[in-house]
């Protein structure tokens, strides 16, 4: 199915009715481990996805499925606690849907975080990575289908999806806080199985530093409708075949738990200085 512009408007209108005069300026999509930041929003207005027309339910573990509006570090934010993934059965268009709704509500910037496998053998599990660019070969574009010109052009430029001034900001904030921050290319894989060792070797040959199952759809939709995008990754595990040990969700969740202090400090520092 394809959403129409009036679907997006209907969702935004339903949210606006709950928000009174409040309008968000920054959207945050928080991946595994960082969802708790939604609980730190001041004067929160939380709206479960099931109350928003056309929104889908979030089924992934650790993804709560609600939008939290309010103030965080002095910014008016909309925090998605729980994102949608292709492996849950959703179309790319459905995954990107909330981004466009938040754009209609006024968000001009998207901060998106995720956990990913580390492909770069010079780096380590637990490192944080700024996303400089992505590779998405395996999935439709969220922009497939009739273009909605209210959001953007038919053939958008994707050469500067991850906004360079926000990357500079993140690097400066990481340096100020004394945190190590890698910078590299995130490659999208559809999952839900982790990749095979051969796929990881292919990803490396193609120029990927990290592999994960999210983020590219949301970033593409955000770029199309003119939002600035800052993407940050927790390299939760070495990708398949690098170490002689199986990959597991428990390892990813544990890494998220361990890194949540540093990762959230960096995200909040960037938010404050946007
Ligand atoms: N591959 C894909 N997605 C992931 C991984 C991985 O190794 N780790 C966390 N998310």
Image (tube, rainbow, N blue to C red):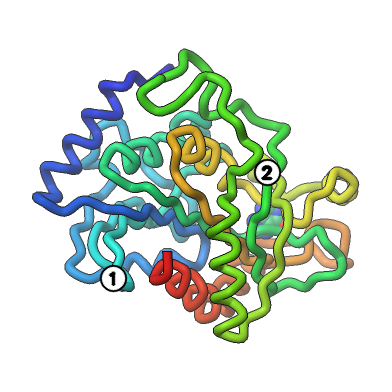
Up-down relation of residue 256 to residue 149 (above or below): below
The 10 Å Cα crowd at callout 2, few under 14, some 14 to 19, many 20 or more, is: many
Percent x, y for residue 159?
A: 66, 38
Up-down relation of residue 239 to residue 1 (above or below): below
Percent x, y for residue 258?
A: 58, 79
Q: Which residue is mark 2?
A: 188
- Mark-to-mark CA distance, 1 and 2: 32 Å
Q: Residue at 41% of width from left, 46% of height from top?
A: 58
Q: Which mark is residue 74?
A: 1
Label count reads 2
Q: Residue at 35% of width from left, 24% of height from top?
A: 150
Q: Which mark is residue 158?
A: none
Horizontal side of residue 40 vs 161, given as left or right = left
- Quarter that holds the C terminus: bottom left
Q: Nearer the viewer, mark 1 or mark 2?
A: 1
User: Which quadrant of the frame does ligand 1 lie within?
Assistant: bottom right
Q: Residue furthest top?
A: 146
């Amino acid at each position: 199915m394809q959403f129409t512009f009036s679907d997006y408007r209907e969702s935004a209108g339903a949210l606006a009715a709950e928000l009174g005069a409040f309008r968000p300026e920054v959207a945050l999509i928080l991946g595994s481990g960082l969802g708790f930041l939604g609980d730190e929003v001041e004067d929160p207005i939380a709206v479960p996805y099931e109350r928003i027309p056309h929104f889908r339910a979030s089924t992934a573990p650790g993804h709560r499925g609600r939008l939290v509006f309010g103030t965080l570090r002095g910014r008016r934010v909309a925090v998605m606690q729980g994102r949608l993934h292709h492996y849950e059965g959703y179309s790319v268009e459905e995954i990107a849907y909330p981004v466009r709704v938040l754009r209609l509500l006024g968000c001009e910037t998207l901060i998106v975080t995720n956990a990913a496998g580390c492909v770069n053998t010079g780096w380590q599990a637990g490192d944080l990575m700024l996303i400089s660019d992505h590779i998405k070969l395996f999935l439709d574009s969220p922009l497939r289908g009739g273009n909605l010109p209210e959001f953007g052009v038919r053939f958008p430029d994707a050469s500067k999806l991850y906004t360079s001034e926000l990357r500079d900001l993140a690097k400066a904030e990481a340096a100020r806080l004394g945190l190590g921050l890698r910078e590299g290319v995130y490659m999208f894989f559809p999952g839900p199985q982790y990749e095979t060792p051969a796929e990881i070797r292919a990803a490396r040959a193609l120029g990927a530093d990290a592999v994960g199952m999210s983020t590219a759809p949301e970033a593409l939709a955000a770029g199309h409708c003119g939002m600035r995008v800052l993407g940050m990754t927790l390299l939760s595990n070495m990708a398949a075949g690098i170490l002689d040990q199986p990959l597991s969700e428990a390892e990813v969740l544990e890494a998220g738990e361990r890194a949540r202090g540093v990762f959230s400090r960096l995200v909040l520092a960037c938010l404050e200085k946007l």
